[in-house]
Image (cartoon, rainbow, N blue to C red):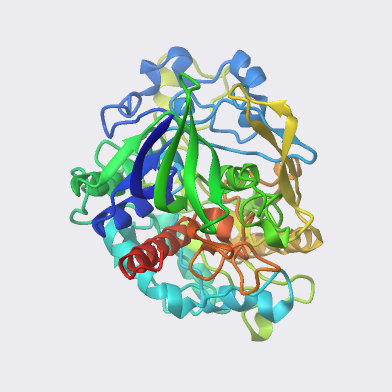
Amino acid sequence: MKDQQYDAIVIGTGITGGWAAKELCENGLKTLVLERGRMIKHIEDYHTANLDPWDMPNGGRITREIKERKFKQHRTGYVTDPVCEHFFVDDTKHPYNEVRRFDWIRGYHVGGKSLMWGRQSYRLSEMDFEANKKDGNGVDWPVRYKDIAPWYSHVEEYIGISGEKLGLPQLPDSEFLKPLPLNCAEDDFRISVAKNMNGRVVTPARVAHITEGTKPGLGRTTCQYRNRCMRGCPYGAYFSSNSSTLPAAEATGNMTLRPHSIVHKIIYDEKTKKASEVEVIDAETKQRHTFKAKIIFLCASTVPSTSILMQSTSKRFPNGLGNDSGELGHNIMDHHFVVGAYAEIENFKEKYYKGRKPGGIYIPRFRNIGGDSNSKDFVRGYGYQGGAWRESMSEVVAELKYGPELKEEILKPGGWRIGVTGFGETLPNHNNRMYLDYDKLDEWGLPTVTFDADFGENELAMREDMKDQAVKMFKAAGYKNVIGYDSIESRAMGLGIHEMGTARMGHDPKTSVLNRYNQIHACKNVFVTDGSFMTSSACQNPSLTYMAFTARAANYAAEQIKNGNL
């Protein structure tokens, strides 16, 4: 079935798809936005957003049946939670394969993972964009910080990022709203690190939450400190496609949104040497459609976008659209974490905190940034995320307390605890890959994905330092019962939900898939702006970077169309 022509097609509605749609539509392009999953309407479809544990079956606890049926998803520890599991893909309906363990976490609905993301938002620095070239891992980025800095600002001013300016070269400042306040224990830790740890910094987490005023979108206002973000925010206080960018795109009158549209492939025209159409399978009827456009933006998330390119074979591209380099599907990266330390804080028992703020503390990278910070054991670096809290109740020994005494005890807050976990950079490695299995098809007749990837020696060496330094910082602060940890059983790619790099950008078509504007080298009207394009991972949460590159690429594409180049 043939359908009408558009100026642009955007595949995916998550963090990057929403931004691509907004920028293209505001540039006057008639844009078709395709989403493989169901429609999610802002506020209306956040049906657990205001539920308390006693409103949920089993007090909101997961059942044994769910644990067993969704065993891959349950490895994360939270995506099977009844209050939010409806936003995460059921692996039994959408299976994938593992040579080496990979936790592939997905959201197939309008808004994608922008509804469930962790909201930590940090810029990459000049040293991140230079790292590959300097230490010889992977290929050189075709851009530098100065190329992306204006687009970071463009995105930040629109969505709202809370934080404090530090002036650190390894972590550039953003356009900030006021930071989330530290509680008394977190502030105590900040003071201790500044005093004892040779230039290290503790700062409030930089999160995509409105802390003052409003931002464009559907009634976006300040954070209410509910910390129920993963259920969808009725206040639009954190950034999502549903509350912000998609409404902006719709307001132009240029957007057509089509849910339940599974993209099978992009069709390449041998005569024009451009992509001409997108073939779509209706998720409900399984009927096939094709849509024409001048430009195509792949924003389906790293693995789905790369899968679409792999399925898009032709005489010109027998191994997948744009895969002249043979790097498509390779170099998959993620951040390694679940390593750090916990401790008890004896002070501040007379103090408590107000509300449930959606962010704790962040410790920027302090390794391999020059001088005494350099390590002989590993390259690149890591940062820490964490926070301090009071235990929910005093220790209760059932044999000694009951009735009124029990009631009195459980109403008392417990002691203060603090914890940090490191987020470390993963080096690009050609042997870390995903590929398609045509012998195992899904219910729409499409190949399933197989993962074969793991962390290497550099990452494992880094983890030792991540644990040791966390312990040293807590001990220097005088905290008690300091325990370092490295959760080996949870140490697998994908768990960070920062998968990236499978269609990397670079200077040379022989070693990369995309150019400096996120265009496929040999098919210039196809842009890939989700995590696929990342040439290295840095150690910062990557979503802000995805958004900045998407906005940059979309405006470049619109300009090229206006100039008759696309």
* 72 to 176, vertically: above or below: above
| Image position, residue 60 (x, y; %) | 46, 20
| Image position, residue 260 (x, y; %) | 43, 28
Considering every residue shown, the one lying at the far bottom of the view is 371
Q: How many marks?
A: 0
Residue at horizontal 44%, vertical 43%?
12
Tell me if 39 is positioned left or right of 307 in this view: left
Tell me if 478 is positioned left or right of 454 in this view: left
Residue at horizontal 48%, vertical 68%?
517
| Image position, residue 108 (x, y; %) | 48, 33
Quarter of image, res 513 = bottom right
In the image, 172 versus 202, the foreground residue is 172
Tell me if 283 is positioned left or right of 502 in this view: left
Considering every residue shown, the one lying at the far front of the view is 271
- State the quadrant of the C terminus: bottom left
Residue at horizontal 48%, vertical 58%?
527
Quarter of image, res 444 = top right
| Image position, residue 187 (x, y; %) | 42, 62
Examine the rendering and report whether any part of residue 374 can be seen.
Answer: no
Examine the rendering and report whether any part of residue 436 can be seen.
Answer: yes
In the image, 522 versus 173, the foreground residue is 522
In the image, 244 versus 209, the foreground residue is 244
- State the quadrant of the N terminus: top left
